Each structure stands twice: as structure tokens, then as C-alpha cells.
Image (cartoon, rainbow, N blue to C red):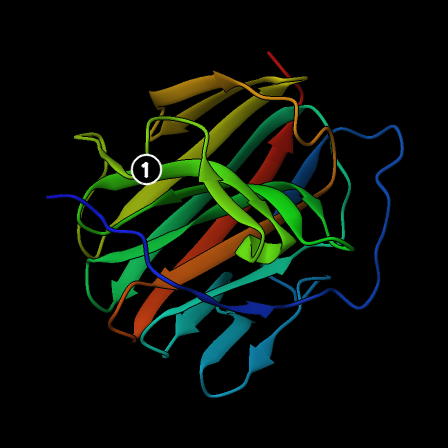
Amino acid sequence: MQKKRVKIAIVLWLTAVLTACGGTNTYSETFDDPGSWRVENSGDVVGEVRDGVFDFTVNEDELTSWTTAGEDFSDGVFSVEATQVTGPDNNAYGLLFRVDDENDDFYSFQISGDGFVWIGRYRDGGAAEAEPIVNDWWFESPVINQGNATNKLSVQAEGQNLIFFVNDQEVGRVTDDAFSSGDIGLMVRTLGVGGVQVQFDNFTVEPLP
């Protein structure tokens, strides 16, 4: 089965206050408190920090939505646990890193409930570019826990060298110098049928090994 390119609409959540990490290269968010992550309830998109997770639902049939943390990182190991709760398995969800909030440019690492991976970069929130940098588009991976299950997504970023992991198993690597630093974020996409609910927990940024 192949995923097909879809025309997307964009809902961008900007954090109210941006904070710099300075010399610190570690970060841990357990979502026990609201923190700096923006919550939203627009009908099409509902996101809130509750019960120790960021609960993120996209109800519109064909929509990409994300939120950012108001942080700034360059290199490190970025990780988050993502649990699909409801919705069709033909979906997309994952983490963002090196986000330029002003220009809506970022790297995106997405998986789907039916076992596919998409790794690429967005420019202007996808309006100018949503281009894969590993393989040609979506590709299948047996290491993904499919359906309503939990997966751990991780990225080891060292300069232009990027390595991607699902459940601690490598699913791709690439050399790309498009973006060097920026914010971190979470993303959920619907690919034709809405009602995708994903809960995120334990977003960490750790020093390179």
C-alpha cells in the first residue's frame, strides 16, 4: 500500500512566549503541568494538557496541525512517546524539531497507525514545501506498533547528520543542512478521515551520546 500526496490545510499554534535555552542542552516535559505548550479548542482541532499527557485531536478530514514548546535547540537527542487513542489508522503523527516559528520552517518526523514513516522538511508550514528527505515519500516499517498503540519516536541530530528511530530501532538517516536550530513541537495530520486522537508524553532533549 502506498500513501498518496494530499493537499493539506494548515493550523499553526504559536506559543505566546518564546524562551531560549541558552547553554542548556537538556529538556524534559512530562505534561504534568500546562507549561508553555499552547492549548487549543477550535472544533477542528482540540489540544490540551491533561492527566499527564498532551491530548491532541484533529477532527477535520484533511488537516495538518501542530504546536510548539517555545524552546530553542540545535543538536541533541529528541524523543517523545506517542499513543494513538482513536481514529483511522491512515493518519500521521509525530515530532518536530529545529522549528523556525517566524517562517514556519521545520523538520518533521511522522509515523502512521498503519505502519508507515515520513521524514522530511516543511517550509512555510508546507505551503512552499513539504519534501521528504528519507526515501521518496512514505515508507513502511515493521518496528511501528500499529493501531491504537504507543510508539517512541527519537531523532539524533548532530549538525547536518540526522538519525531517526522508532521504538529504539533505526528507520532512517540523512545528511541535510536546511535547518540548524529552533523550537520543538508535536504534529497530528488527518489524511482524508478526521477524528484522529493522539496523546503525547515524556518529550525529552538530551545531550548527544
Q: Is residue 165 visible?
A: yes
Q: Hey, which residue is sitting farthest top in the picture?
A: 209
Question: Residue 27: where, in percent of width, then height?
Answer: 69, 38
Question: Residue 137: where, in percent of width, then height?
Answer: 32, 37
Q: Quadrant of the N terminus?
A: top left
Question: Residue 44: where, in percent of width, then height?
Answer: 44, 82
Q: Which one is nearer the viewer's eye here, 192 or 81? A: 192
Q: Is residue 30 visible?
A: no
Q: Residue at x 23, y 37 (%)?
A: 144
Q: Which one is nearer the viewer's eye here, 138 or 206? A: 138
| Residue type at tag 1 | Trp
**Other residues around mark 1 within 10 Å, as few (<14) / some (14–19) / many (≥20):** some
Residue pointed to by mark 1: 137
Residue 92 relative to residue 101: left or right? left
Q: Which one is nearer the viewer's eye here, 105 or 20? A: 105
Question: Residue 59: where, in percent of width, then height?
Answer: 36, 79
Q: Residue at x 32, y 31 (%)?
A: 136
Disc 1 element: loop
Task: Say above or below: 13 vs 45.
Answer: above
Task: Say above or below: 151 vs 161.
Answer: below
Q: Quadrant of residue 35?
A: bottom right
Q: Quadrant of the C terminus?
A: top right
Task: Say above or below: 70 vs 164.
Answer: below
Q: Residue at x 32, y 42 (%)?
A: 151
Q: Residue at x 73, y 62 (%)?
A: 36
